[in-house]
Amino acid sequence: MTHEDFEQLVEELKAADPVAFGLESDPKATVEQVEKAEQDLGVTFPRAYRFFLRNYGGGQFAYSRICSVEPNSPWNIVELNQSTTLLPENFVAFTENGTGDFYGFQCSSAGSCSEEVYFYDHEAAQQQATDKKFLEFLAWYALS
């Protein structure tokens, strides 16, 4: 899914269901905020997640909550990942599913995060690919 396709889906949902975007969300991120969060986590976010942060911010987003890099947000990605002891070292969570499991990115030992979204099951202590890249995941998870 291209950035333009995603933006079109967002605009269509805003027109069809403005209440979905009525709750306060975190502000759009600056380049410096994104780079600081990456530095704090020791990773490089996928290009699509960087696009999302810079254009939508995060926090409450349509029918979901997606981590932002806003320093004082309860949905700050750095705080979530540094305070959750359940997560493996090579995983950066960007949202919870409400039952203690997470969606996020698998990261290489060099810190490069995957474009593909992974599901982390805390009970099984396993990561599983979702077969969706980040924007496709958001279209499914947050916009439908």
Image: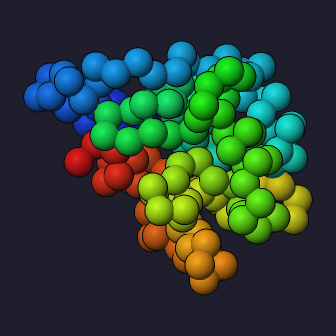
Displayed quadrant of residue 49: top right
Q: Residue at position x 79%, y 38% from top?
A: 38
Give x and y (percent) for residue 66.
50, 40
Give x and y (percent) for residue 85.
77, 60
Instruction: Please indicate whether residue 11 sits to the left or right of residue 101 in the image.
Output: left
Displayed quadrant of residue 5: top left
Give x and y (percent) for residue 16.
11, 28
Give x and y (percent) for residue 19.
20, 24
Res. 1 in view: no
- What colour scheme does the image use? rainbow
Res. 63 in view: yes
Q: Judge by depth and name the residue closer to the eye, 98 or 106.
A: 98
Displayed quadrant of residue 89: bottom right
Q: Residue at position x 76%, y 48% from top?
A: 83
Q: Judge by depth and name the residue closer to the eye, 51 or 90.
A: 90
Q: Is residue 7 above or below residue 138?
A: above
Instruction: Please indicate whether residue 72 sits to the left or right of residue 94 in the image.
Output: right
